[in-house]
Image (cartoon, rainbow, N blue to C red):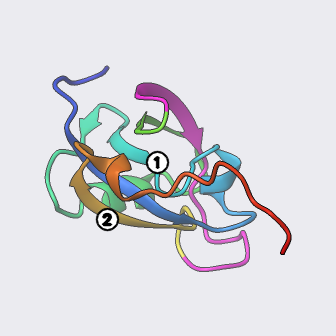
Amino acid sequence: MLFFPLTIGNKSQQVQDGSPGQQAGLESFFDFIVSIGNKRLDQDNEMLKEALRDAVGTEAKMCVYSSKMQSVRKVIVRPGEGWGEQGLLGISIRFCSFEGANENVWHVLRTCSC
């Protein structure tokens, strides 16, 4: 179930290589986790952490808003600690609004070798 309007969520600041978050296709800087299961993540609280702990070893469905694509998609993650690093998803998150989220992202159009 999707909840509207979508304006806030848990922004993926960094996604670790080989992590459950990377395996689910989460993208650093652009993806906002807006719900897990049927729980809307519209408050800065422990709901995401609790839902992930409850889902360890199983599949959890999440709705993710991409500020780059400006669309919502569903992803399935398998939270766990056995992937080699810290955290159940292997991502760093920050609860914030995604209005204007792309204003602080650099877009590299071309590089040159000098």
Q: Residue at x 23, y 64 (%)?
A: 46
Residue lying farthest to the right in this orientation: 113
Q: Confirm whether residue 17 shows in the render.
A: yes
Q: Which label was assigned to residue 109?
A: none
Q: Is residue 17 magenta?
A: no
Give the residue pinned by disc 1: 30
**Residue that carries the numbered disc 2 in the rendered image:** 94
Quarter of the image with the C terminus is: bottom right
- Give the structural element (helix, strand or loop) at label 1: loop
Residue drawn 71% across the image and 52% down it? 110
The residue segment tinted magenta is 69-86
Above or below: residue 103 compared with residue 4: below
The N terminus - image quarter: top left
- Label 2, secondary structure: give it: strand
Residue 18 in the image, given as x and y percentages of width and height: 75, 63
Crowding at mark 2 (Cα within 10 Å: few <14, some 14-19, many 20+): some
Q: Amino acid at mark 2?
A: Arg
Amino acid type, label 1: Phe
User: What's the CA distance linking mark 1 and mark 2?
Assistant: 12 Å
Residue 95 lies in quadrant: bottom left
**70 in magenta:** yes
Q: Position of residue 6 (x, y in %)?
A: 22, 31
Indicate whether 62 appears above or below 52. above
- Callout 1: 10 Å neighbours few (<14), some, many (20+)? many
Task: Name which quarter of the figure residue 8 lies in.
Answer: top left
Q: x, y (%) of residue 101?
A: 32, 49
